[in-house]
C-alpha cells in the first residue's frame, strides 16, 4: 500500500510509535493530525515531535469551541453519565476526532486514516464507527491493534528508535485529557484493590490538602446551557476552564469506577472531571425545579440511553438525532441560577432559583402564608386508594397466611 494516511496524533506512546510503524509496515506517508480539545498546552512541541519522528506533515486544529458547543453542552443538557458515574469526557471527543480525520483525509487526498487505540479499548469502536458513518470508503488502520506488542515492548520500541514519549516503565500511566475531563489508566491502577496514588492526579487537590474554608460558586444557565459564573458571562471554553480550576482546588471531581467496557470486559478507570461533576449536579438541580415529575422521570430514562449511545460510539446515528430532539425540547425552561458549595472533595447544591420555577412557596409552606387546601386531602386519598381498598375487600391484602 502506498500514498498518505492521516493519523490521529496525540504525542503519546502509541501514536508516536505508530508514525514509524506505519512507514515501515505500510509504506505510507503519515500526516499527523493533532486536535486541540483542551488536552495540551504546547502544540508547537507536539507538532515538532511528529515531524521529528517521521511524519511528512503535522496539522493542528483548535476544536475547543466546536467540542464544547456541539458535544459537551448537549451531553450536559442530557445529564449524560455512563453507569451513573463517568461524564464521558474521552468518549465525547472521539466522534469529533473521527469527523476531523475524515475532513483532513479528504483535503490531503489520503486513502486511509489511523488511530492509536488498542484492541481492548472503547476508542477504536468510537472512532471507526464514526469514520464509517461519514466516509465508508476510507481504509482504517489501527497499529496498536495490529503490532502485538505489550506496553513494555512498545516503550522498548520507542527507545530503540529514539522516539521521545512521556511514559516510562516506572510511571506507565496512560492518560487522555480534554476540557471535560482526564482519564488515567494502567500501572498500579489495574489492581482495583489499590488506592490511586496521588501522582495519578493532576487537576484536583487531595481533599485533605484542600482549603479548610468552603468555596461557593453561582452558575447561570439558559435553556440548560451554562453561560455565567458568579454573575460574569463567559464563553463555554473559559467557563469550563475556570470552573475546573476552582472545583479542582477544593478536591472536587475525582472518580474511581469499575466500568463495563463496550468490548465486554470490566475495567478499573480513574477520572478527574471537576467542572463536569459540578455542572452536571447544578444542571440536575435546576431541572428538578423547572421540570414536572413526569418530565423528570422520562428525562432520566433518556439520559441513560444517551450516555450509553455516546459511550458505545453511536454519535452519528439516527437514534442520536431522535434523542437529541427530545432533550432539546426538555430544556426550554431550564433557565436560572444554581449556588453550590465546594468543600474537601464534596460538591453540594445549596441554592437554586429560576423565573420558570414550578416550586410554589405558598403551596409548600406550613406557615401562615399557606394556600394549600388541606381539606381536599381526604377526598384525594379516597379516590387514590379506592382500587387498593376494593381489591383488599374482594381478594384480601395478598399477605402470606400462616399455615
Image: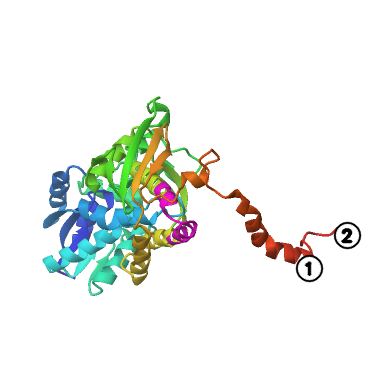
Majority secondary structure in the magenta region? helix
381 with respect to 83 (left or right): right
Q: Quadrant of the N terminus?
A: bottom left
State yes or no: residue 233 in magenta.
no
**Residue 33 placed where, x, y %?**
18, 56
Name the foreground residue: 191 vs 352.
352
In primary-sequence order, the first of circles 2 and 1 is 1
Left or right: residue 147 compared with residue 65: right
Question: Which image quadrant for residue 132?
Answer: bottom left
Find residue 272 and report its image quarter. Answer: top left
Crowding at label 1, few (<14), some or many (≥20) Cα neighbours within 10 Å? few
Q: Nearer the viewer, residue 361 or 192?
A: 361
Q: What secondary structure is marked by label 2?
A: loop
For disc 1, the marked residue is: 394
Numbered badge on residue 403: 2
Residue for point 29% across, 66% down: 130
- Which labelled disc corresponds to residue 97? none
Q: 190 left or right of 37?
A: right
Q: Which residue lies at the image location 24% right of the left edge and 48% below the top edge?
A: 236
- Region rendered in magenta: 285-302
C-alpha distance separating marks 2 and 1: 21 Å
Amino acid at each position: 500500500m502506498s500514498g498518505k494516511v492521516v493519523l490521529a496524533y496525540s504525542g503519546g506512546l502509541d501514536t508516536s510509535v505508530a508514525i514509524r510503524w506505519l512507514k515501515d509496515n505500510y509504506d505510507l506517508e503519515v500526516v499527523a493530525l493533532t486536535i486541540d480539545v483542551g488536552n495540551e498546552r504546547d502544540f508547537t512541541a507536539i507538532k515538532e515531535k511528529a515531524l521529528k519522528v517521521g511524519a511528512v506533515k503535522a496539522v493542528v486544529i483548535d476544536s475547543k469551541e466546536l467540542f464544547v458547543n456541539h458535544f459537551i453542552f448537549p451531553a450536559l443538557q442530557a445529564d449524560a453519565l455512563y453507569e451513573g458515574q463517568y461524564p464521558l469526557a474521552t468518549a465525547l471527543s472521539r466522534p469529533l476526532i473521527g469527523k476531523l480525520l475524515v475532513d483532513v483525509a479528504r483535503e490531503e487526498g489520503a486513502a486511509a486514516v489511523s488511530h492509536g487505540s488498542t484492541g481492548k479499548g472503547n476508542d477504536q469502536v468510537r472512532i471507526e464507527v464514526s469514520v464509517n458513518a461519514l466516509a465508508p470508503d476510507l481504509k482504517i488502520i489501527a497499529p496498536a491493534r495490529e503490532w502485538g506488542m505489550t506496553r513494555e515492548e512498545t516503550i522498548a520500541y520507542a527507545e530503540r528508535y529514539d522516539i521521545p514519549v512521556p511514559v516510562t516503565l516506572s510511571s506507565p500511566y496512560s492518560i487522555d485529557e480534554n476540557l471535560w475531563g482526564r482519564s488515567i489508566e494502567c500501572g498500579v491502577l489495574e489492581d482495583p484493590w489499590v488506592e490511586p496514588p496521588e501522582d495519578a492526579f493532576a487537576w484536583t487537590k487531595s481533599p485533605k490538602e484542600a482549603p479548610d474554608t468552603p468555596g461557593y460558586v453561582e452558575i447561570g444557565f439558559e435553556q440548560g446551557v451554562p453561560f455565567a459564573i458568579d454573575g460574569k458571562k463567559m464563553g463555554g471554553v473559559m467557563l469550563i476552564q475556570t470552573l475546573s480550576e476552582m472545583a479542582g482546588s477544593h478536591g472536587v471531581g475525582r472518580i474511581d469506577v469499575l466500568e463495563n467496557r463496550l468490548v465486554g470486559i470490566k475495567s478499573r478507570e480513574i477520572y478527574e472531571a471537576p467542572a463536569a461533576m459540578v455542572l452536571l449536579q447544578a444542571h440536575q438541580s435546576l431541572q428538578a425545579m423547572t421540570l414536572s415529575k413526569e418530565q423528570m422521570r422520562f428525562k432520566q430514562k433518556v439520559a441513560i440511553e444517551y450516555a450509553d449511545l455516546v459511550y458505545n460510539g453511536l454519535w452519528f446515528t439516527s437514534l442520536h438525532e431522535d434523542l437529541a430532539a427530545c432533550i432539546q425540547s426538555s430544556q426550554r425552561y431550564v433557565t436560572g441560577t444554581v449556588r453550590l458549595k465546594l468543600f474537601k472533595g464534596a460538591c453540594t447544591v445549596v441554592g437554586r432559583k429560576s423565573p420558570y420555577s414550578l416550586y410554589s412557596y405558598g403551596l409548600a409552606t406550613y406557615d401562615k402564608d399557606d394556600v394549600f387546601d388541606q381539606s381536599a386531602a381526604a377526598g384525594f386519598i379516597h379516590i387514590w386508594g379506592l382500587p387498593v381498598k376494593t381489591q383488599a375487600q374482594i381478594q384480601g391484602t395478598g399477605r402470606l397466611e400462616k399455615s
